[in-house]
Image (cartoon, rainbow, N blue to C red):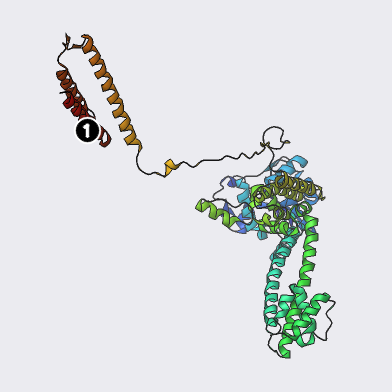
Amino acid sequence: MLVLFETAAGYAIFKVLNEKKLQEVDSLWKEFETPEKANKIVKLKHFEKFQDTTEALAASTALVEGKLSKNLKKILKKIVAKDAHEQLAVADAKLGGVIKEKLNLSCIHSPMVTELMRGIRSQVEGLITGLPSREMAAMCLGLAHSLSRYKLKFSPDKVDTMIIQAISLLDDLDKELNNYIMRCREWYGWHFPELGKIITDNLTYCKCVRKVGDRSNFASSDVSDILPEEIEEDVKAAAEISMGTEVSEEDINNIIHLCDQVIEISEYRTQLYDYLKNRMMAIAPNLTVMVGELVGARLIAHAGSLLNLAKHPASTVQLLGAEKALFRALKTKRDTPKFGLIYHASLVGQSNAKNKGKISRMLAAKTALTIRYDALGENTSAEMGAENRLKVETRLRLLEERGIRRISGTGKALAKTDKYQNKSEVKVFDPSGDSTLPVGSKKRKIQEVDEQDTEVAVKAKKFKAEMKEGTAVEDGEPVKKKKKKKDKEKQAEEEMVVSEELPTSPVTENTEKKKKKKKKMKDEVED
């Protein structure tokens, strides 16, 4: 068995002397405790030294990527081809597959080979003769530096590092500028407070203070190159009647120095913004067209790189920057946020409050497509971003001007609505609703009593008629006619019994008393 071993100094090919000991993987490390023991297991067959660091870097890069370099191919053809019947042990299975494919050599990669490589590495100075340890260490260090520099230089992920640094610096400059301008206005406001109300622009304010200095110089100085004529007249008039305090020349010099700092930082910020705009158009043109330079740069900085941002789905792109609000909403079981950093895009700002969520969702979906196109595509044109932006603008116009279209059908017709017709109705006031007394129950009782009275009266009339004709029957026997007085007494008794059976109410009792009095009067008259 032959072993291919890569070092920082060159390629080494070893011949395994005792293959039986390789079978004991767990105890193999004991055979490499000393150089003498190691020489009994493996023996150096050939060593190909690198000529310079460039060749070493090329060989290392090829090994990292799993490719077969030209140097290694020549060595394997010369040395290993002679012993083609033997197996070649390699540290990388991918490299072994390439060697087998191109040179038709049987390669082996297993835990035993890994343990063997570890043993050779521990005793490499004793196994490879004619290579001093200092030279070996220097070559290792030089190769490590070269390989790291190469990776940083050609890594596709590191191209957008400039954008991340630029947008972070831009945000820091904005904070510093706000602090400096606020301090400048407050400081000079003690001397000339009226100037802050007349000049609202911060940069113009600082330029004016730097040019004039003391407020007494406004009358004699010409600031027409900084201010319009109308504002210049207002400033000169306010300077004559100012309520500010007097300050020394040293104070004015310090304020002027602060104004210089503000103006310099503002100019540098403008320059940095132009640089960021150019870098964004070069690296992510479609993303820049969709959401703008600042929002696109902030999305890339938040994700870490353009490639990491391309791996995020559209829902994550929509909520980037609002993670704290999202997890707080999930914890408290409330409504989740609808937008994060994408809220500052111009398309979301154009929409009204009702449609901001819909537009941000659609914009995030199209932005995710443009990010992937920029990160993974080969074309550098911004046509795709322009097309997607036009679609989002059309959708926004439909939502705000024409309303939402029907979901069913073709989706082209607007939702139909009936024409509104005003119908005037005159309503009359119902006074029965004002009474709060329970009237309904009494009415029912009176109606029931009246119905019972009518039934009793009908029965009495029928009985009288039968008595006159002589056909009246009581308990299955015919009833004979008696005297008029007795009939009347019996009729009165029956009515008394009926009146006792009926439910009494205050209204019916009065009527019954009156009837009784009338009957008594009639009976007396008849007697």
Compared across the picture, whether 304 is left or right of 223 comes to left
Residue 226 seen in the current view: no
Residue that badge 1 annotates: 513
Q: Quadrant of residue 468?
A: top left
Vertical placement of residue 119 versus 270, above or below: above
**Could you tell me which residue is drawn at 73 percent across and 46 percent down?**
401
Expressed as whole percent of the image width and height from the top left, the position of residue 112 reads 60, 47
Residue 323 vs residue 202, the one in the foreground: 202
Compared across the picture, whether 483 is left or right of 216 comes to left
Compared across the picture, whether 62 is left or right of 40 comes to right
Q: Quadrant of the C terminus?
A: top left
Vertical placement of residue 246 versus 259, above or below: below
**Could you tell me which residue is drawn at 79 percent across and 49 percent down?**
386
Q: Quadrant of the N terminus?
A: top right
| Residue lying at the far bottom of the rendered structure | 248
Amino acid type, callout 1: Lys
Q: Quadrant of residue 50?
A: bottom right
Expressed as whole percent of the image width and height from the top left, the position of residue 287 reads 75, 52
Residue 228 seen in the current view: yes
Expressed as whole percent of the image width and height from the top left, the position of residue 269 reads 76, 69
